[in-house]
Image (cartoon, rainbow, N blue to C red):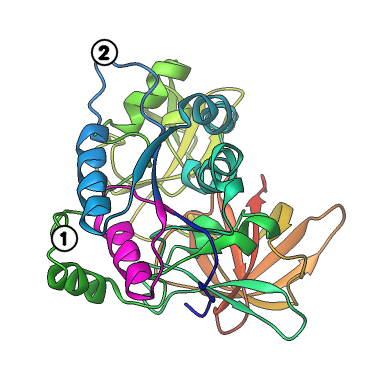
């Protein structure tokens, strides 16, 4: 974290988790006393939803008070459900695989929050595992964390340049185990709290149940791609994604989803642990978003999901911001709607991301 903090106004987003808590400890260690904010983006309906928001606020409040900082709850509930949920449901209905957390960072944490409170500050700090650096031309880059498992640049790759210019990641240069150790040394109340899993606003709610409430169900066939044989049925193609293996309820497996017919509501599957039809080596991405205006070169690395692995590829520009990705190796589970996040050859600097298109 090489950003100069002296004389700069800093807002810190506290989530109630250990990462943002240690981010606060790190800022205080560097002589900065930020104003702390908890973003409320809870579920749309109270009845029947199990949400950990109250516990989160309690944890965030305790950590803020530990360092003599004030905490304010900022309600971005309406913006989340009108923007991020709308995006998610539109993609799901179209048979695509969206990533709500990516859009939450752009539209809510560095978007709606900025409009409500963040605009009063020079920097907005978060507990993300990511780094930034500025090149000789004055361009600020989003850069990967030294912890390959926890690195979250893929969730930040749709930020606008002006959002990145205000972003501050105090723990981005640490490993997760180091962050835990720092929390223990600071005797933070959430030092041993488990990391949250899944989509940021759902809490303990099952994602499939969330989809069912807003999209509904519609029975369709499960067909073996190689033979055209109907081998089962499902309750709606939107519950499934390309490459999925678990939750299909089919005997004689393993079975992998390799294709979806959205119009006919048919899911096509292939049998075996490594069916060739589950792998893709060349695929298009559309609407490539460059974070700082710099476009990627031909030789890049990329990832299509939140995993530690990066893949090498050649990026071939097409028309209207479309690229063809030619991966050096076959990739399992490439699904339209996923974000393909593009990095330099050393997978250090992140250029941005584009949405995988139907192929």
> Which residue: 75% across, 77% down?
297
Numbered tag placed on residue 47 in the rendering: 2
Q: Nearer the viewer, residue 170 or 204?
A: 170
Mark toward the start of the polypeptide (2 vs 1) = 2
Image quadrant in which you'd find residue 229: top left
- Residue pictured at 56% horizontal, 84% vertical: 346
Q: Tell whether label 1 touches label 2 (CB within 8 Å).
A: no
Residue 272's x, y, as percent? Answer: 34, 54
Which disc number belongs to residue 116? none
Q: Residues within 10 Å of mark 2 (few under 14, many from 20)?
A: few
Q: Is residue 244 above or below residue 135?
A: above
Q: Which residue is mark 1?
A: 188
Residue 219 seen in render: no
Q: Which contiguous range is marked in magenta?
A: 12-35
Near mark 1 (Cα within 10 A), the count class, few <14, some 14-19 or many ≥20, is many
What is the residue that sits farthest to the right in this orientation?
A: 319
Quadrant of the rendered image containing residue 251:
top left
């Amino acid at each position: 974290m090489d950003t100069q903090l002296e004389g700069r106004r800093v807002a810190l987003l506290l989530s109630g988790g250990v990462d943002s808590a240690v981010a606060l400890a790190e800022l205080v260690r560097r002589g900065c006393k930020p104003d702390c904010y908890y973003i409320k983006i809870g579920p749309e309906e109270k009845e029947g939803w199990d949400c950990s928001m109250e516990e989160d606020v309690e944890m965030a409040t305790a950590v803020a008070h530990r360092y003599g900082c004030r905490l304010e709850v900022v309600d971005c509930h309406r913006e989340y459900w009108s923007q991020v949920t709308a995006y998610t449901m539109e993609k799901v209905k179209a048979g695509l695989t969206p990533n709500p957390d990516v859009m939450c960072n752009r539209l809510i944490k560095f978007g709606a929050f900025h409009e409500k409170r963040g605009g009063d500050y020079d920097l907005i700090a978060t507990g993300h595992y990511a780094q930034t650096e500025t090149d000789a031309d004055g361009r600020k880059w989003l850069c990967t964390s030294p912890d390959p498992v926890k690195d979250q640049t893929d969730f930040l790759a749709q930020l606008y340049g002006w959002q990145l210019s205000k972003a501050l990641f105090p723990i981005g240069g640490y490993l997760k185990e180091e962050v835990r150790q720092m929390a223990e040394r600071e005797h933070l109340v959430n030092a041993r709290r488990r990391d949250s899993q899944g989509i940021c606003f759902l809490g303990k709610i099952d994602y499939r149940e969330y989809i069912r409430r807003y999209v509904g169900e519609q029975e369709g066939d499960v067909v073996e791609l190689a033979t055209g044989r109907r081998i089962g049925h499902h309750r709606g193609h939107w519950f499934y994604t390309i490459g999925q293996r678990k939750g299909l309820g089919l005997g004689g497996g393993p079975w992998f989803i390799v294709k979806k017919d959205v119009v006919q509501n048919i899911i096509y599957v292939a049998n075996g642990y490594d069916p060739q039809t589950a792998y893709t080596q060349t695929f298009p991405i559309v609407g490539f978003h460059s974070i700082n205006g710099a476009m990627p070169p031909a030789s890049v690395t990329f990832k299509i999901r939140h995993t530690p692995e990066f893949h090498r590829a050649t990026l071939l520009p097409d028309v209207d911001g479309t690229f063809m990705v030619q991966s050096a190796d076959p990739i399992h589970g490439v699904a339209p709607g996923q974000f393909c996040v593009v990095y330099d050859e050393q997978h250090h600097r992140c250029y941005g991301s584009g949405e995988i298109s139907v192929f």
